Image: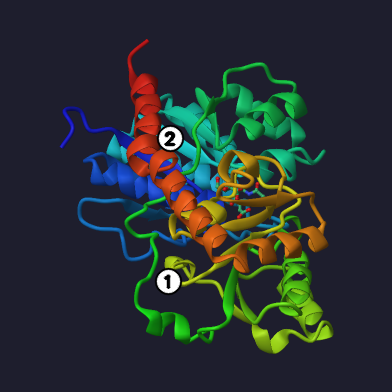
């Protein structure tokens, strides 16, 4: 138990997205170190389910009010209200908002209501590069970034983009995503892999929330090119608007038998632990947590060189990068790795080593804790 345990509220998206995953993994790590962590949201975050307990982390449900006069419920107002209640009831001194909108806005609102709690905002990617920069949100996002007591971004790329897109000149601390390399590691039991691929087949994996920025159709295109030269299978993990178009493209290209769509599930390490190659052809990616989780499992990554991906995947060392949309090059890169046992093994080992040495919780979690401690110091 630390000398003065921190009491922290966490706001995040609960669906299967990277920001909610980071918020949850961080909340669990912080709670493990003896601090009091309260998640507040519309539903239990994806990876938190089953981990709440007597000693926390705790989860507080936000209820919304459907009044006939309202065209729609106003969940961010209800979130600010619920957060204010939890802050007052449990004496919380800090709110960590993951994703600028609407969470940072709700946190600042609760700060105004309660007259207490410092607000730390972590920018994750599309909250800045896509949604937050949209004219319908630009002013509220900018305001949230300016007024938060501390702001972090998950990559140098994202910190720079934020300053450029919103014209803000405040400090933005870069704290990279992290991966639990005990949980995310190679699965040694060959019978698990045999459920999905024959021994002589390469097993490729893509994990995402199947939004347009993830370019899942490029995953299929890349795989179809590679599959003409190598016996292989592809597992598509996750769900989202581009899942059906990706399925249809797999049908058109005649690879559907070798491509399986497994839907969304939190224990993604079970699949990454048996994979041979991870594909991430995104058009935008502030960091690429899914790629890091694959790397921890000794899986080399073939990706686009978009956004913050090069801060994670080192071209030629832990994977190979190419221009967004260049599926010929991606297929070529995948074959380069999979056809050469030495290259494959070296890259896999380098990938795990990088995850352990650069992105382990023991290195990243203290950076958040130091920021928390600085924030709650009396001024
Ligand atoms: O793109 C996702 O998978 C979801 C999205 C989110 O905010 O929920 O992920 C973003 O945050 C992750 C965690 O910090 C990053 O690793 C992802 O790169 C980032 N996604 C994008 O920038 C597209």
Residue in the image at 55% along x and 56% along y: 290
Q: Position of residue 40 (x, y in %)?
A: 43, 49
List the residue tagged with mark 1: 270
Report helix, strand or loop for mark 1: helix
- Residue at point 47% right, 87% down? 195
State the residue lying farthest toward the top.
379
* Residue identifier under label 2: 95
Res 174 visible: yes
From the top left corner, tell me how far across and down residue 307 is, in percent: 70, 41
In the image, 31 versus 295, the foreground residue is: 295
Q: Is residue 141 left or right of residue 81?
A: right
- Residue 32 position (above or below residue 152): below
Q: Report crowding for label 1: few under 14, some 14 to 19, many 20 or more residues within 10 A (C-alpha).
A: some
Quadrant housing the N terminus: top left
Q: Which residue appears at 45% of the width and 80% of the height?
A: 193
Of the numbered discs 2 and 1, the one sitting upstream in the chain is 2
């Amino acid at each position: 138990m630390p000398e003065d345990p921190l009491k922290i509220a966490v706001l995040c998206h609960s669906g299967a997205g990277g920001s909610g995953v980071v918020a949850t993994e961080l909340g669990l790590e912080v709670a493990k170190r003896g601090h009091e962590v309260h998640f507040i949201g519309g539903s239990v975050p994806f990876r938190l389910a089953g981990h709440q307990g007597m000693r926390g982390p705790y989860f507080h449900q936000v209820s919304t009010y459907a009044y006939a006069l309202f065209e729609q419920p106003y969940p961010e107002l209800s979130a600010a209200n619920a957060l204010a209640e939890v802050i007052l009831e449990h004496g919380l001194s800090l709110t960590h908002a993951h994703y600028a909108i609407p969470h940072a806005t709700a946190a600042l609102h609760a700060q105004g209501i309660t007259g207490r709690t410092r607000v730390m905002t972590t920018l994750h990617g599309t909250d800045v590069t896509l949604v937050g920069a949209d004219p319908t949100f630009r002013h509220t996002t900018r305001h949230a970034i300016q007024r938060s007591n501390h702001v972090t971004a998950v990559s140098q790329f994202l910190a720079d983009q934020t300053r450029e897109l919103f014209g803000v000149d405040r400090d933005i601390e870069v704290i990279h995503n992290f991966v639990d390399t005990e949980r995310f590691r190679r699965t040694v039991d060959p019978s698990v892999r045999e459920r999905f691929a024959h021994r002589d087949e390469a097993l490729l994996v893509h994990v995402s929330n199947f939004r347009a920025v993830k370019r899942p159709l490029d995953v299929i295109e890349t795989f179809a090119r590679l599959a003409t030269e190598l016996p292989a299978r592809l597992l598509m993990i996750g769900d989202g608007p581009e899942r059906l178009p990706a399925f249809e493209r797999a049908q058109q290209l005649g690879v559907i038998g070798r491509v399986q769509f497994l839907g969304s599930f939190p224990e993604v390490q079970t699949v990454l632990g048996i994979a041979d190659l991870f594909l991430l052809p995104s058009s935008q990616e502030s960091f690429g947590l899914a790629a890091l989780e694959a790397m921890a499992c000794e899986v080399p990554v073939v990706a686009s060189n978009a956004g913050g991906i090069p801060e994670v995947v080192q071209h030629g060392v832990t994977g190979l990068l190419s221009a967004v949309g260049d599926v010929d090059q991606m297929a070529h890169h995948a074959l380069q790795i999979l056809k050469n046992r030495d290259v494959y093994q070296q890259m896999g080992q380098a990938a795990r080593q990088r995850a352990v040495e650069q992105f382990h919780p023991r290195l990243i979690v203290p950076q958040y804790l130091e920021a928390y401690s600085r924030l709650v110091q009396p001024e």
